[in-house]
Image (spheres, helix red, strand yellow):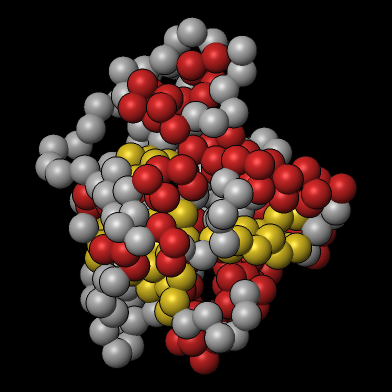
Amino acid sequence: MTLDAAYLRGSMAAILSVLQHSSCPENMIFHFLSAASKPSSFSTLNQTLTNSFPYLNFQIYPFDDIAVSRLISTSIRSALDTPLNYARSYLADLLPRCIVRVVYLDSDLILVDDIAKLAATPLSDTEVLAAPEYCSANFSTYFTPSFWANPSLSLTFSNRKRPCYFNTGVMVIDLQRWRAGDYTTVIEEWMELQKRMRIYELGSLPPFLLVFAGRITAVDRRWNQHGLGGDNFRGLCRELHPGPVSLLHWSGKGKPWVRLDAKMPCPLDVVWAPYDLLQTP
């Protein structure tokens, strides 16, 4: 997970939910990426984690957010332009090489099932990651008309099985295969092209789609009951999608801690509330 002051409250709730629903919490190891440009926050984040989870096995890694910021183009949502939002692309570089597989989680979610089940998702011999996939979404909208009008770009997806949108907030990643394919460099090359000619609009997601769409293992959607953040501008609340639930994800503009503090929660925000360790008075 990434870790910063702005989303710390969400991260703490996510950690607690993982531990509470794990069959072997003592086997859990957390790896956190935090902005290297804010070294003063390291001690605060470390102390908060230690105070709340005295026996937590964790490590915080400095992420070079300043270097990455040079590659970032503005998107349709300013919140998506935060360099730390791109840290998931650098896990293979930052984590020790002895770590073979990780589960990456966003900070705006909680688990209500054992994460070991998600971590055990089988990958085929050629696939690098598994994530919740949504083939009913209009894939073309994630890229600009100029991208699709350029044959050398649009043919990127021609030799793949059906490319679909997938959610990068819940991923199982084989770091050995990622390193072997040097996928961090490949993602950065797409980001550099984006700086020269605008080919997408939505933050760190499109580079992942460009590299991996049509090449992933689909995770059961029970592991990503997503979109619960709704639309903060219009104040819309979302309901659960039909089917079982293992993970609730407040993706979208609205975050449960913000709405709870404002005394304007959505119905499902009360499910998040019991995990809120940093609630304000």
On the rendered structure, is 106 left or right of 110?
A: right
Locate the N terminus and report the quarter of the image it occupies.
Answer: bottom right
Image coordinates for residue 205, horizontal then vertical, percent:
49, 56
Quarter residue 130 falls in: bottom left
233, 64: nearer the viewer: 64
Q: Is residue 40 above or below residue 26?
A: above
Any part of residue 146 in sight: no
Does residue 39 appear left or right of residue 5 in this picture? right
Q: Among all residues in the image, which is located at the extreme top?
A: 263
Horizontal relation, residue 145 to residue 121: left or right:
right
In this rendering, the answer to whether 256 lies above or below 180 is above
Residue 88 image position (x, y, % from top left): 56, 63
Q: Quadrant of the rendered structure where residue 154 is?
A: bottom left
Seen in the picture, residue 125 relative to 171 is either above or below; the reply is below
Mark yes or no: residue 23 visible. yes
Question: Percent x, y for residue 22?
Answer: 34, 54
Q: Is residue 237 left or right of residue 221?
A: right
Query: Residue at 57% of width from left, 22% of height from top?
Result: 279
Q: Nearer the viewer, residue 212 or 241?
A: 241
